């Protein structure tokens, strides 16, 4: 009886529980999320004197319900998460073992519509290897047209959820990967995936990554949703003029970022533009050109999407989406369909439909650059393009890809038939 009486106060003190632990590795950091039954009361410290490097978190008045098995297996930075002797009764001490020292950011988040109270640990450092068909910034060496593809949401932001429980973040990543694969098959273009796995990237960082990749076009892939199941169809969005003006104001205030937008002209402007009029004029020109190019690209993509799916809106729509705010990269947001519509949710989950979406977006992008070629790229060259035939390719596929005709390819290569062989070299005539 005495032992039970002594044990009761310690158990009563633990009035908060750690219900689950989630680990989200991304290329440049790992996020660890502790799902709590109530707002966490915590302290933390690091032990970086020797390996294994450790981040130690003390949860006051807290017990652990969550399993810690196999956590960190997908992260290059986090080795494991384990318990240790707590500093006082009724508390929990957890240790995150790290491969490298990391400047950890630890903060609490309140409950929202998707999650309850959380303690979040952001650990900067290389956490996963880039995967999939898209290239890294370091690999984008040739002067090809570069398309930055942003799969919306990710990690602990699932996006919209369909009637059958499917997450927008998973669907759009599959479409983005399929689109990157289509683009990288094109000798005139190359793809850069902003998000390569199931992790979250802040909106500002998404657009910054596109600028780092020197993208010629930024595409953000999403799936729409509504409070009722009836709406359906795809739509394409561009930045509204009001939001554009607000963003220009922010860029004008951030003088250290002028060189990013104005390039070599920044130093001349800073020397001669005492009142800021020249800077504002140049920024206005950049933004106007970016928005006009984005609108034209949106029209080309809509024309192709309309051949394989119903359109919710037949013209590009303007909105204040944060991911469309890069002043010097034409930006487009594509809603591939309504995940809130049961039939469309099934379509969006279909690999066949995802491939169709990817092909139509790719063709729309290609059509845009054929009509608006960038100097120094294949699109601006009049000479034929050399193509090595790969498995599964046919003359009709190549004609569509290069915006020419089967007959033109046959005539240019002195072909009497239509049979192709893997490894065969063709010259594709310019149109």
Image: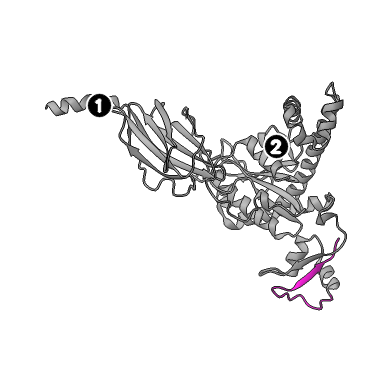
Foreground: 231 or 243? 243
In the drawing, what numbered circle is on residue 324? 2
SS majority, magenta: loop
Report whether residue 307 is seen.
no
* Element type at mark 2: helix
Picture coordinates of residue 378 (x, y %)?
Answer: 81, 57
Q: Residue at x 77, y 46 (%)?
A: 297
Q: Which residues are magenta?
A: 414-431
Find disc 1 in the rendering and name its residue: 10
Picture coordinates of residue 146 (x, y %)?
Answer: 73, 50
Can you name the residue that lies furthest to the front here?
49
Q: Nearer the viewer, mark 2 or mark 1?
A: 1
- The quarter holding residue 329 reads top right
Residue 258 on the magenta segment: no
Picture coordinates of residue 431 (x, y %)?
Answer: 86, 60
* Element type at mark 1: helix
- The quarter holding residue 116 reads top left
Foreground: 182 or 166? 182
Q: Would you call the spot at circle 2 few (<14 residues within 10 Å), some (14-19), or many (20 or more)?
A: many
Residue 420 on the magenta segment: yes
In the drawing, what numbered circle is on residue 102? none
- The quarter holding residue 39 reads top left
Q: Horizontal placement of 234 versus 103: left or right?
A: right
Q: Residue at x 46, y 45 (%)?
A: 99
Asked if 279 appears above or below 176 in the picture, the reply is: above
Q: Would you call the spot at circle 1 few (<14 residues within 10 Å), some (14-19), or many (20 or more)?
A: some
């Amino acid at each position: 009886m005495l032992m039970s009486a002594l044990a009761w106060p310690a158990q009563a003190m633990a009035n908060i529980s750690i219900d689950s632990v989630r680990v989200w590795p991304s290329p440049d950091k790992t996020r660890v999320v502790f799902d709590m039954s109530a707002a966490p009361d915590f302290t933390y410290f690091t032990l970086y004197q020797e390996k294994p490097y450790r981040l130690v978190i003390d949860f006051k008045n807290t017990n652990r319900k969550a399993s810690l098995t196999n956590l960190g297996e997908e992260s290059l930075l986090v080795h494991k998460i384990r318990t240790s002797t707590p500093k006082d009764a009724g508390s929990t001490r957890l240790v995150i073992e790290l491969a490298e020292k990391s400047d950890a950011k630890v903060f609490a988040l309140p409950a929202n519509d998707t999650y309850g109270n959380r303690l979040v640990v952001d650990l900067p450092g290389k956490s996963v290897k880039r995967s999939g068909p898209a290239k890294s910034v370091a690999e984008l060496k040739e002067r090809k047209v570069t398309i930055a593809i942003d799969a919306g949401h990710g990690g602990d932001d699932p996006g919209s959820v369909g009637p059958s429980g499917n997450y927008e973040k998973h669907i759009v990543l599959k479409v983005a990967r399929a689109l990157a694969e289509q683009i990288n098959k094109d000798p005139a273009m190359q793809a850069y995936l902003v998000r390569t796995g199931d992790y979250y990237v802040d909106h500002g960082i998404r657009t910054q990554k596109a600028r780092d990749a020197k993208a010629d076009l930024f595409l953000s892939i999403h799936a729409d949703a509504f409070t009722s199941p009836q709406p359906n169809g795809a739509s394409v969005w561009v930045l509204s003029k009001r939001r554009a003006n607000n963003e220009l104001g922010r860029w004008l205030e951030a003088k250290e970022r002028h060189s990013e937008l104005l390039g070599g002209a920044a130093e001349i402007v800073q020397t001669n533009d005492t009142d800021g009029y020249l800077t504002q004029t140049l920024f206005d020109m950049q933004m106007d050109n970016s928005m006009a190019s984005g609108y034209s690209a949106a029209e080309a993509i809509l024309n192709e999407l309309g051949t394989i799916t119903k359109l919710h809106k037949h013209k590009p729509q303007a909105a204040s989406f944060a991911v469309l705010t890069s002043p010097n990269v034409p930006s487009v947001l594509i809603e591939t369909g309504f995940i809130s519509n049961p039939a469309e949710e099934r379509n969006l989950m279909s690999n066949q439909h995802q491939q169709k979406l990817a092909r139509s977006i790719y063709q729309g992008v290609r059509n845009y650059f054929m009509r608006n070629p960038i100097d120094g790229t294949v699109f601006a060259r009049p000479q034929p393009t050399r193509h090595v035939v790969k498995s599964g390719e046919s003359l009709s596929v190549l004609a569509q890809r290069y915006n020419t005709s089967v007959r033109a390819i046959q005539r240019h290569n002195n072909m009497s038939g239509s049979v192709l062989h893997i490894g065969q070299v063709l010259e594709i005539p310019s149109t």
